Image (cartoon, coloured by chain):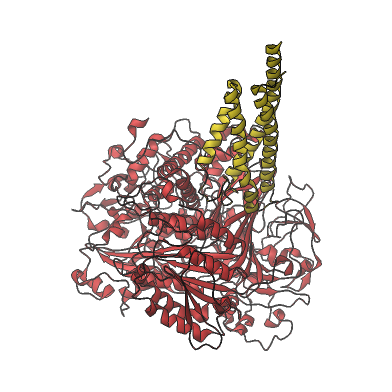
Amino acid sequence: MAFNFPAFSYIIALIVDAFLIFFSLFHVIAFDELKTDYKNPIDQCNSLNPLVLPEYLLHILFNVLFAASGEWFSLCLNVPLIAYHINRYRTRPVMSGYGIYDPTSIMNADVLTRCQREGWIKLAFYLLSFFYYLYGYVIALENDHIEHT
Amino acid sequence: MTDRRPNGFPSLRQAPPIDQFNGAHSSQSSRSSSPNSRAIPASQLPPSRPPLALASPSKHPPGPLPTSAPIGPSNINSNPSGGSIEKFAPVVNDNSANINAQHLILDGNVRWKRATYDQYSNSEFGANPIENRSVGVAKSSNEIPARTASSYFGEAPAKQPLVDVQSTFNRNVPANPVRSSHGPYSNDTAQVIQPHVNSQLAKDEVVTKIPLNASVPSDPIGYRSQTSFNRNAPATMNSNRMPYGGVYSHSTNVTQQMGALKIDQNRARIDNSAPFYGNSANQIRPAYNQNVPQAPANVVRTTYDANRRPPLPQNSLNSPQIVPNSPQIVPNSPQNGPNLAYNQPPKVNLHSHRYPTPFGDHAPHHYEQQFDLLQQPNVLPPIKEPPPAIRLLDQTNVEANCSPDLFRCTITNVPESASLLQKSRLPFGLLIHPFRDLAHLPVIQCNVIVRCRACRTYINPFVTFSDAKRWKCNLCYRINELPEEFQYDPLTKTYGDPSRRPEIRSSTLEYIAPAEYMLRPPQPAVYLYLLDLSRAAAETGYLSTVCEVLLEELGGVPGDARTQIGFVGFDSALHFYSMSEGANQPHEMTVMDVDDAFIPTPDDLLVNLHDRQDLIVDLLRLLPRRFARTTNTSSCLGAALQAAYKLTASTGGRITVFAASLPDTGPGKLINRESTNGELTDASKLNPANDFYKKMALECSAQQIAVDLFVLGDRHVDLATISGVSRFTGGQIQRHPLLDGGGGVATRGNFARSFRRYVTRKIGFEAVMRVRCNRGLSVHSFHGNFFVRSTDLLSLPNVNPDSGFAMQITIDEALNDIRTACFQCALLYTSSKGERRIRVHTLCLPIVKSLTEVINSADQECVVGLLAKMAVDRSLTSGLMDAREAFINAVIDVLGAYKVSLNAGAAPSGLPAPDRLKLLPLYVMSLLKNRAFRNDRSIKLDERLCKMMEMKTKPLYMLMLEIYPDLYAIDDLYNQPVVSTDDGEEVNVPVRLQLTARCLRNDGIFLMDSGEKMLILVCPNASPDTLKQMFDVSNLKSLVSSSDVPELENDVNRRLRKFIDYLNEDRPFRAALEVIRDDSPNRGEFFERLVEDRGENALSYYEFLQHVKTQVK
């Protein structure tokens, strides 16, 4: 029984998604720390900003795999998030480094709540999609099995 | 709904909520969880305040009230000498005369010093330290035991010179004896404030604060006195008191009979361009004054002259107006006081001369007063109104509240829930001017600074004492122990009554902080000047001014013996000036490699101001000549900042940057973004082009370095980008265009004055500011120049007395279980003398439940100030047009909310506005025409941005002058009411005029005061006599634009100069003065500020109101 490409893309998605879950968890915790005065916004932005692009790229990576393997439904589920990510990065504050968080504006209550909400929503999304990828992986194996028998 | 909009306004959304400035997220959204947040019509709400001993004045009907003594106008007017009235106006620490004039030092041995803060601050700036010990004795009132100097000095009492006792303390003498001569206050001295029981918070705690001074005139009394005063006041206004009345001859006969009022129904059809103000409506004066039945029918003769300058019915400004659908006539307004000035010019003694009202803080609050803006266009009070008084019902020390000059809230009654706030549509925020120069400030040194153990709130006048050993925090309600030391009352030298401590008597005070408030030992004051030496800078000639001022003021630079100073120049290279020990003259070292600049001889660049004074003086003499003929046109500001950062990083300090040209080489170089055919008003150009300067600012901020920016000349320097370096380091930004004498004569002098102020003013280093508030309230966002280090902590590398801050507050949880909301601002800083100090301001506001109370307690100036700051943010995020819309929507929302709160069966047809918000549309309209927000492509990018920065940082009293300048007619000062200042000088202060050409007369001379600049306009037909006396010119033609009023020995001139001095009194530096003729080339500067008139694609005030009216639902 061969390991087909859809199954491969799902297993990659599964692994990457686990990372993304950690990323969003970290994001939520970081903003909570900011809200409760534990961290200096400069330090916090310095630790958050390097993670922004990797997160976006990882997310795009397995969606490319989905596209290649013809998993259109899974791809459609993720397209809104990709669009959101692209837009978020496009409208980031003027800054020379990578990342989207600016220590001078991050302490604004609006920005803080928005970022925190974004973290929670993404966490939920990644968690749900984790199980979906698991399911998709099994289905892909199943299909493969059916084809071979 | 779009088709009815006039031209000037973009298409509008249906009025969104007030937090439209905050973008999509509305943090004030109503919470269904809160029981009080359900929409309840105001009428169905329970009575807003529980009945208490001191009833709110709003509960009183406006009818006659029983007063304890008969009061007539004579009671007020016959009080020329001072003291008494002065006591009622809002001022910082006036409540406790025996405290605020002190410099208290309490150490282990409990040693006492007493001096005025003036003297204190003198000594801080290097004046005679002996003065610090000069002693005044408050020896006046029957409550305060007579003390001698010795009682304040443990050791050496008799030897201390008793300097000027009277003059030091005459203002602080408790006015009880004087006040008791007033009828209504006569019971004050005997008054014992009822200990109240705070039923909700602590059922059994009886507040044991009985102020021994008892200098708290309770509100109802003040109200009564006002009421009866007004009823007896002869309120007839004869046309001879109308300033311009007699000039015109076109007549509008208004016959008015008692009780039968004729209202000209034609008002609705008034042509906008035609001066509808001249219509009869304003001359109608209902016979409200029962005590003066012989009020004559007023026949006002008016005309419109060829210039269509109709008369302003000035004398009817205060007359009660008739609102058609609400026929109640509101008899007495707080502005009736000055009206009397016309009848029998009294000498109104001013307490705080910015609010020259004889009633001061105790002007009654008319909840029921309502204005129909469309029918009463002349809303501007002729003299400045005080900010609304804060009415705490259950505090015995009402006067202890923070001065509105320092700490001000947009709503003086805090709504109890977010939904109530949402209904009122008012922005909720604080405006604070924490480091303002204060005349009297109690300074306390003690072993333990008493703070709440839970929330770290400093003890303040609004805490309650459960017994003599414990106090209850008014922010978190924790019960805390009092240290033993706090039991000691330093004044009476007795133990056991903590409520007499200065901490409890004054809500603004300063602590000298012990070592645990320091992260490192206090650093020396370090001043580094970065001088632009490029061609553009040489053309402005700023360098000679800077060097001159510095040469003169080197002795006055704040700091101690360790003070350091240094200079770095920059054009396309960096120029360092080494002033090494033993050198005969300063050495210049030029570093050409700006991309990786190094610092030659780092030790000799920043030198001790006192040790190397000769070298510094040499350098300052040489510098202006050295670069006067430079041909170098580029500027490497970025590299200069990096070098300056390296120089000062170890100590922190202040970097002063003078920039005249765009930084185009080295790190942080910029390209010119200014477009040649006018500026677009989208957000992109108002935002920085790169983040070099912001990152630089963050680095500086971390090392306690502040960068102040002076932009000189009119060239584009991309202020949007380079201002970042000041914005996030607590610096200030000033722009001085036209230094090279192109336009204004006054500008160079103005730059010199403002720079002199800058060099010598007080400064605080390594500062942080924290704002604490009750649980349930939180700071949403801050406005000003600083770096926000955490949700309620601002990092301010430098703090200066000329910058203000603002914060928006959100209500997170319903506040229905508490009755007062408190805000405490603590500013921790290192003084220039190397002392760590904490300045604490506490503001306490009542919490109310009804929409009416919220709306009627709005502080319109403060609201406008906050709106302006929010609009700047909005402009930067989503563009100028968006911000302009938001302004208009804010007005529409507030007036709409007021209409809802009126809850009248038949909605009033006009545009009703509450008394406390009647100027809001006017101010907002002037903001729309301000250069910061005007939709005008000819305004340069830098200028607009600089104005926006000013909106963010100027303290409110200066901001209001910028938004709506004061206009006075000064050609007849002799006949104007007299006020006497603190120094006992008597000044003629004319009434303020509305900013419209209608107020100008052909033969008048007018002064427009916009804070940093005063313009005197001489109209073509001004009388030659006056011109001769005022300006020493024989006719108008020979009057050239000048920057000053000559000093002449005649009455007219002297009165004018006195008046100008009076206006300047409170400013950080004297305003620039410019005399212009009606045909001068720069007359536009004057007429541009006449904001009520219709301008190029801008609406007149009346059109604006009509537009608002169509939108108010």
In the image, residue B928 above or below residue B538: above
Coordinates of residue B363 in the picture (x, y in percent): 51, 55
Q: Position of residue B992 (x, y in %)?
A: 37, 59
Instruction: Name the one closer to the observer, B1078 or B928.
Output: B928
Q: Closest to the observer: B271 or A36? A: A36
Number of callouts: 0
Residue B187 showing in the rendered view: no
Q: Nearer the viewer, residue B349 or B167?
A: B167
The image quarter in which residue B1017 lies: bottom left
Q: Position of residue B361 (x, y in %)?
A: 54, 58
- Identify the residue at horizontal 44%, vertical 59% (top origin): B669
Colour of chain B as rendered: red
In the rendered image of this protein, which colour is used for chain A? yellow
Residue B549 seen from this side: yes
Q: Look at the image and tell me in which quarter the C terminus of chain B lies.
A: top left
Which image quarter holds the N terminus of chain B? top left
**Up-down relation of residue B907 to residue B203 (above or below):** above
For image coordinates 65% across by 26% down, the residue present is A9
Residue B645 position by quadrant:
bottom right
Residue at x-position 64% and y-position 40%: A116
